[in-house]
Image (cartoon, coloured by chain):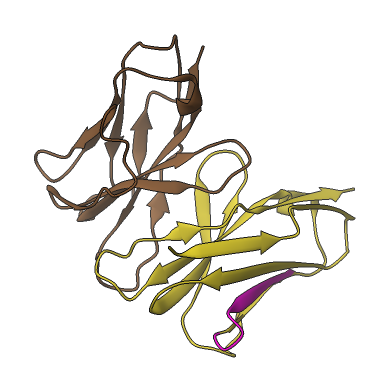
């Protein structure tokens, strides 16, 4: 059974701090790892990673994948209160169907 | 482009009652997913449709849950009878190609409370 574990469960930082979120996984025939941000209800897509060692970057957010060690990191620099959310990591196998297995998420609270 | 639509947004029922949720995916998206997200956990896939066919329903509690996508567009998820542990947010998502590397787009979800 595919498994995704995220750490820490939650963290509290102040505006301007940098946060690092971790995602480790076990999946049969890995194909992709995705990061989502969930503020209220619907998760919104951030990144998809398929190749090891390549950093994906969007503004203050960046992510990297290590396929050998089976983990990914999501970094947020110069945090703002609008970054407060639950960040979800999901993995997809090389099977038909694009099925995703999600981790439990990391809750980030950014204080002013 | 309109997003994934879901209704209702909230539902409160008593245990043993029935409930149904509706989802309309992004236009042209062939693949539709229903997830259950219990408070404090990540979403768990219940069922996946490719057009009007079921691709994966291995985690759907079939004794009480059912889902259909008769015309390959919108979909309904039903729970009958509901249990207390069914209290969760039910998320619908869609993607354009099942076998390709495409992200899933999520709807706003339906928060179900079973009393």
Looking at the image, residue B104 lies above or below residue A76: above
Q: Residue at x 16, y 40 (%)?
A: B69
Q: Judge whether residue B8 can be spotted in this image.
A: yes
Position of residue B45 in the picture relative to residue B53 (left or right): right
Against A36, residue B15 (above or below) is above
Tell me which corner region of the image, top left, top right, bottom left or bottom right, holds residue B82: top left
Q: Is residue A69 magenta?
A: yes
The residue under the point 63% across, 53% down is A105
Residue B13 relative to residue A107: left or right: left
Residue A52 position, x and y percent, is 54, 89
Which residue is painted at 41% across and 68% down in the image? A92
What is chain B's hue in the picture?
brown
* Rendering coords of residue A37 (x, y %): 59, 55
Within the magenta stretch, is there residue A81? no
Q: Closer to the camera, B52 or B26?
A: B52
Magenta-colored span: A67-75
Locate residue B90 relative to residue B101 in the image: left or right: right
Q: Where is residue A88? Give x, y as percent.
A: 58, 57
The quarter holding residue A27 reads bottom left
Q: Left or right: A87 with respect to B70?
A: right
Q: How far across and how far down the image is residue B3, in percent?
A: 37, 46
Farthest left residue in view: B71
Q: Is residue A71 above or below residue A82?
A: below
Q: Quadrant of residue A41?
A: top right
Count of all numbered marks drawn on residues in the image: 0
Q: Is residue A59 visible?
A: no
Q: Nearer the viewer, residue A88 or A7?
A: A7
The chain painted yellow is A
């Amino acid at each position: 059974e595919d498994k995704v574990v995220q750490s820490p469960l939650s963290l509290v930082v102040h505006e301007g701090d940098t946060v690092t979120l971790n995602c480790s996984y076990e999946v049969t025939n890995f194909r992709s790892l995705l990061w989502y941000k969930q503020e209220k209800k619907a998760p919104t897509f951030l990144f998809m990673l398929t190749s090891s060692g390549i950093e994906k970057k969007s503004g203050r957010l960046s992510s990297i994948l290590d396929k050998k060690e089976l983990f990914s990191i999501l970094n947020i620099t110069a945090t703002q209160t609008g970054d407060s959310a639950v960040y979800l990591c999901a993995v997809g196998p090389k099977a038909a169907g694009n099925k995703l297995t999600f981790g439990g998420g990391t809750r980030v609270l950014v204080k002013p | 482009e309109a997003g994934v639509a879901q209704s209702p947004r909230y539902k409160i029922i008593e245990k043993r009652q029935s409930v149904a949720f509706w989802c309309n995916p992004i236009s042209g998206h062939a693949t539709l997913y229903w997830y259950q997200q219990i408070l404090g956990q990540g979403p768990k896939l219940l069922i996946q449709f490719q057009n009007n066919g079921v691709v994966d329903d291995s985690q759907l509690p079939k004794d009480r849950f059912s889902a259909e996508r008769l015309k390959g567009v919108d979909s309904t998820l039903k729970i009958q009878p509901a249990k207390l542990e069914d209290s969760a947010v039910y998320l619908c998502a869609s993607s354009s190609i099942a076998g390709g590397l495409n992200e899933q787009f999520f709807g706003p979800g339906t928060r179900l409370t079973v009393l």
